Image (cartoon, rainbow, N blue to C red):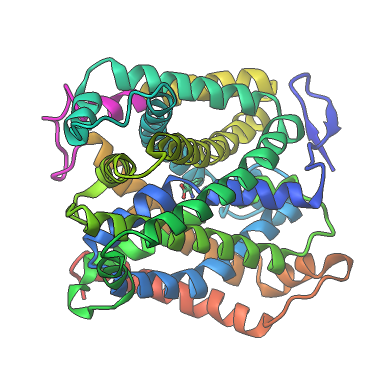
Amino acid sequence: MSTRNSNGSLEPREQWGTKLGFMLAATGSAIGLGNIWRFPFVVGEGGGAAFVLIYLGFVCLIGIPLLIGEISIGRKGRANAMDSYKTIKPKSKWYFNGYISILINFMILSFYSVVAGWAFYYFVLALTGQLITNDRSYENVFEGFITNPFMPIIWQILLMGLVVAIVMGGVKKGIEKWNNILMPTLFILLIILVFRSLSLENAHIGLQFFLKPDFSAINSSTILAALGQAFFSLSLATGLYVTYGSYSRSNSNLPANAGGIVFLDLVVAIMAGLIIFPAVFHYGIDPQSGPDLVFITFPTMFTDMAFGTIFAVVFFFFVFVAALTSAISLLEVVVAFVKEKFLMSRKAATIIAGAVITVVGLFCTLSFGPLSHITILDRTIFELFDFISAEVLLPFAGLILALFLGWGWKPAGVKEEVEKEGNPFPLFKTWSFLIKYVIPIIIIVIFLDSLGVI
Ligand code: PHE
């Protein structure tokens, strides 16, 4: 297992230090703003529990099977998100999907770093005791901050600097080391917050919204949103699992890994819902208030709590860390590609990719302020990046991924990789049926439906 380095000579491919290293890094990627920030607001906009149920269906039927397949591609191909396809099927055009995934990561990180930068700022505000105030003007504070032409840019650049520094450290010393510390911290914080939110007065109203389905809220755009959210939250079809899978050990148990990642990602999204919705209803905040939900609801909740400032520090640290580990993974997919494609050192590839993404990301940031008047397809630049990457490119890349696994590489090939070193592949026949027929059909139907064709 070797990779060509910047001098053109072969060197051993980087690898996770331990089996757990892969799991923590992969869950670190999956768990992020998608769970804490995006999930609550798409649930809010999609009408609550009915949306959650559809989301759950997608996660199980599409998420788990594709995840097993995507990690196998990386572990078999032992290369970046594009070249792994080439190693497996040298004379075909499937590798094209790799290019799409690089583009997806590029686009997601451009807008993701905006919100991650906000989280960074809020963490520092909380830490310096400036966030929680008695006049409760959280909406103004937030609006003032994100529309400012300079402040959010500074935080976005700081955040990207941090991400670049970590990714530059490489797989074991950078990404793995950080995830090992950050991910367990995250879970502990989350559990504390769930208890707090559930003990709020009127918590049951929020819980009802979150857990009791009303199917009248469902239409074709909510279904597409649920599908996009499933892909986004699991970091699925982004080439992330190909890339991280390519650093994994050949004896890792892929179905177990995939199940574990999906389970943890789901648990965190549900916990985020359990934290947010009771608080939203308790304070009379509109659950459809969109992307700013987290930045307004939580400070309000902390103001009324004993030790509110401490909770605010803990919470925004949590959001920041979750965003950081995902941003690391988004950059790593691009870096692995640039490094191997252009035979660059990791350092150079990271700096170049990080700089270009930061510059593009600035436009996303400014679309909340000075550039807010620019709209394309009725969306600001930020919203457009989010929509195109999550609801168009991700499901599309997922479709091609399923077709590759089912009809290009073929289930027998995937089975051989999964079962390497004696690992089991439970429910293989079901898996293969889902991959070959069910998943492509579901994605195509949802696309056609949202285009109004059917
Ligand atoms: N899954 C991450 C989240 O939930 C976002 C992400 C998407 C990360 C795609 C990597 C690739 O925040």
Residue placed farthest to the front in the image?
306
Residue 449 left/right relative to 115 = left
Quadrant that contains the C terminus: bottom left
User: Residue at 26% across / 30% down in the picture?
Assistant: 133
User: Residue at 18% across / 32% down in the picture?
Assistant: 137
In this view, 70 is above or below 172 = below
Quadrant that contains the N terminus: top right
Q: Nearer the viewer, residue 391 or 10?
A: 391
In this view, 234 is above or below 66 = above
User: What are the residue bounds of the magenta stretch?
Assistant: 361-380
Q: Position of residue 140 (x, y in %)?
A: 16, 30
Q: Position of residue 360 (x, y in %)?
A: 36, 25
Residue 92 left/right relative to 416 = left
User: Residue at 66% across / 57% down in the picture?
Assistant: 71
Would you say residue 447 sits in the magenta stretch? no
Q: Position of residue 399 (x, y in %)?
A: 46, 64
Q: Is residue 168 visible?
A: yes
Q: How many marks?
A: 0
Residue 414 left/right relative to 29 = right
Q: Nearer the viewer, residue 424 or 17?
A: 17
In this view, 387 is above or below 447 = above
Would you say residue 364 sits in the magenta stretch? yes
Q: Nearer the viewer, residue 228 or 100?
A: 228
Residue 192 left/right relative to 296 = right
Q: Main secondary structure of the magenta part?
A: loop
Q: Position of residue 181 (x, y in %)?
A: 67, 39
Residue placed farthest to the right in the image?
421
